[in-house]
Image: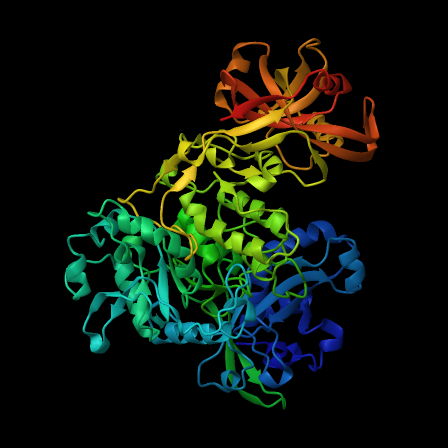
Amino acid sequence: MLCEHCEAFDIQDFSPHGKSFQESKHGQTRDILSLKRGQDAGCAFCNLLMEHVREGLAMAESVKGKELELSIHVEANSLGGDGTQKSLQDGLRINRFFVSIRPRYVPYDVAAWHGKWPIHIERDLCVISDPASPARKAEDVVGQWLGHDLSSDHHFETISRWLHSCLTHSQCNQTLSQKRIWNIWEVPLPLRCVELLSHGKGIRLRETDGQRGAYITLSHRWTADTGRCGTTASNYNARLEGKEFPWLSQVFRDALKVTERMGVRYIWIDTLCIIQDGDGGKDWRQEAPKMSQYYQYSLLTISAAVSSPAMGIFNAKIPDKIPQKLVRLPYRDSECCQKGHFYVYERGVGLFAQYEMALQASQFPNRGWIFQEWLLSRRVIYYTDYGLFFECQAHSSKNDSQELAQPITSSQYSPKEINLHPELRWAHIDNTNSNLKVRIGLGKTPPEELWYRLIESYSFRDLTRPEEDRLIALSGIKDAFEEILQQTPGTHWSSEYIAGVWISDVHYSLLWHKEQDSLNDSKVKNLPSWSWAALIAKVRWPRRGQVIPACEISLAGQPEDYEAVSSSPQRISLNLESITSPPGPIIVPHSLQVHGKLIPVLLRQGISQSDELQPVMYITDFEETFNCENIRQVCSISNPYLVGGWGSLEALEVQERLQRSQGATVFALHVSTRKVHKSAIRLGSLWGSYDIFEVLYLDCVGEGKYCRVGVGRIYEQALLDDFSKVNKISFELV
């Protein structure tokens, strides 16, 4: 049953030419009293709206004041399958309603200025129509109910439409370094692929080196079942003949089905296409440098982001896929003639929240290997517990109804690239609503900043064997970044890259610090203390500024003195280097040769209160977030009560020394001088323009050898003068 008002519902009001456009901005507004009357009279749509805004109304009542009457405003999501606004000739293409609460009579712009209104309802209303209905044929309502079965024809038709649309995006037809991919259907094939034989005759491992075509890649978590499927030296020849595939994991079988249904002949699965055992790791070392190309040139990547891989990718739980309280509304065409109906129902969990929970349940964002696969893949289909999500370079993730997964932040609901929290989601750049992948594709992030944003997003992710994989799991991103450097005119960076650090930017690279919420971090034993890669934790770099290097830093020793860190032939996850890189181990030096000034300083108790820490950070031109427990006062040896700087410590042994005594002596290396201009706060003599020393804190571990224990800044003139009293010395930083 519908009330008189809802019986007259006209979806054309959401058009720019709709009759209520001037009053309600592509939507419809109803006052609360009218909706309550309709609800009391048994109107299904009024009841749906009132139930939908129940929690929001409680919030609104607390801020509205007695003089305001409230109304509910409904806006439509009018995005096409590719996430772009359609022309007026294409129909409204509505698949969602967004609901907000606002004062009935207060002008919208004035209310927004006060920052209280409108109050947006996080969950959205899904708008769907039957495939043969007039609403669908006119492309006014394009939302669809696909059902539970992710292997259904409807789902594959949706994937095909999305892929066809994505291939028209210029950003999606270029690599991470923006190299043009002219024909995705005729790209160089990997050394080997799994070939799907015609007429359902099975599969075989195929040597495809030197051939061209299209292929799909699979991104998956390594499980106990994965190893049982692997190609080995003993079954390799048989697999070339289509034999020796007695058992495949359900994820692999489902991925093969997706490939077949998409009409693609080849799929690349690391476990099947790289020899896992029996050759001493030779094939792994040859294939690892090629995976960057494999993922960037694939037609699409299937992401098995399900919480239970043993059940495959089609058996999603889909807890929110059954429509509750389905309401039928009349459909009126552009001539105001009623022609059939369409349907509205409430999503139990907001789409953006669904996307978050799906990734959290799969544990995908926490894995170091998978981060690289995601970043390099041009198109990704996520099979999750909440259904399908699609992602490409041009637009944020969408679900299987072509709905953009985006936070509710704007009354206009324009498509925004999502910014995902680092523990649950993929990538982050400070607090902006910008998808890192989209920013790279559009060239929005300067190369000198891009590398550090990538590392910040990768640094805390899990690796089963960090001693072996910490750098290899990043090598493909490193290679793509090197291509970006080569294409950037005027860059001062060279290609000398060691232990995750570009030597030409080594002074800045050494200034990484452990971020505030770095918990359960651990050391990587075979990596040098000065590299961010030696610590599995969230790390960040300070904002660049007017900085002058204060010491000379170069690689110590000769290449033959470096340690070769090879990968494990027993566990093959996705490692990425460029196709042109020679096969071989990743080389890691033990030390840097430093010629600079060292002075002993005393580390004292921490700065326990954030209100004490904030002015110190401001005056030292440091705008990042720290865990106060890791921040220590830095004092002069000659005057232990003179606090002249601060330090952020990551070395556990130094923290333990501090707990056992009133202080701990370490050495401060003057890395660079930062020119600061501050006038809002005065700290002692610091005000206006002055110099701050950026330092590393070191421990002596042998004659002429030091290791890093922390990072920080020195600002007190007495400590700055101590540096001027000593000469530069040469030593090894290990």
Looking at the picture, the colour scheme in use is rainbow
Residue nearer the viewer, 585 or 636: 585
Identity of the residue drawn at 28% across and 55% down: 274
In the rendered view, would you say 613 is above or below 570?
above
Identity of the residue drawn at 50% across and 15% down: 703
| The quarter of the displayed image where residue 437 is located | bottom right
In the rendered view, would you say 283 is above or below 688?
below
Residue 637 position, x and y percent, is 66, 11
Residue 582 visible: yes
In the rendered view, would you say 685 is above or below 384?
above
| The quarter of the displayed image where residue 149 is located | bottom left
In the rendered view, would you say 133 is above or below 295?
below
347 lies left or right of 252: right
Residue 298 position, x and y percent, is 40, 65
Residue 432 position, x and y percent, is 64, 51
Residue 112 position, x and y percent, is 76, 58
Identity of the residue drawn at 53% across and 52% down: 482
Identity of the residue drawn at 41% across and 57% down: 579
303 lies left or right of 57: left
| The quarter of the displayed image where residue 235 is located | bottom left
Residue nearer the viewer, 506 or 426: 506
